[in-house]
Amino acid sequence: MYEIPLGYLAGQVVTIATSLFDASLPVPELDQKRIPLRVVDPVGNGTRPRPPRRPAPDRPATPVEFDPRRTLDAADEEDADDELF
């Protein structure tokens, strides 16, 4: 099993290149650039620092107004309108 640097290819579509003529490692390619693989190190991965998580979005200054009854009433009105046609 092999790995690449943390998060390097997250969300990317890559091509995996390999040779059927020799026993070389498969090589991921992104934008015509080869990315080196390394053997998975589970012990090292368990102690390796991770990048900080993204900060949580700011909370609104006032609570968001939500009244489930109003939402249900609006849905009932739409259903009544649909029955007319």
Image (cartoon, helix red, strand yellow):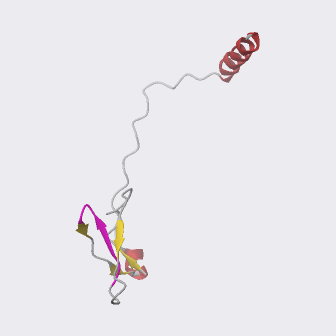
Q: Residue furthest bottom?
A: 22
Quadrant in the picture for the N terminus: bottom left
- Start-end of magenta stretch: 25-32
Residue positioned 43% across, 34% down in the render:
59
Q: Is residue 26 magenta?
A: yes
Q: Residue at x 43, y 29 (%)?
A: 60
Q: Is residue 25 left or right of residue 85?
A: left
- The residue most toward the front is 21
Q: Residue 9 at x, y = what percent?
A: 34, 62
User: Which quadrant of the figure contains the C terminus?
Assistant: top right
**Residue at screen point 33% across, 61% down:** 51
Placement of 71 over or under 38, stated as above or below: above
Q: Nearer the viewer, residue 22 or 40?
A: 22
Q: Residue furthest left?
A: 33
| Front residue of this view, candidates 22 and 41 | 22
Q: Residue at x 76, y 14 (%)?
A: 83
Q: Is residue 25 above or below residue 14?
A: below
Eyeballing the image, is 33 above or below 39? above
Q: Position of residue 4 (x, y in %)?
A: 33, 72
Q: Is residue 82 above or below residue 3?
A: above
In front here: 21 or 28?
Answer: 21
> How many numbered tags mark residues here?
0
Image quadrant in which you'd find residue 40: bottom left
Residue 76, percent from left and from top: 73, 17
In the image, residue 68 lies in the stretch drawn in magenta: no
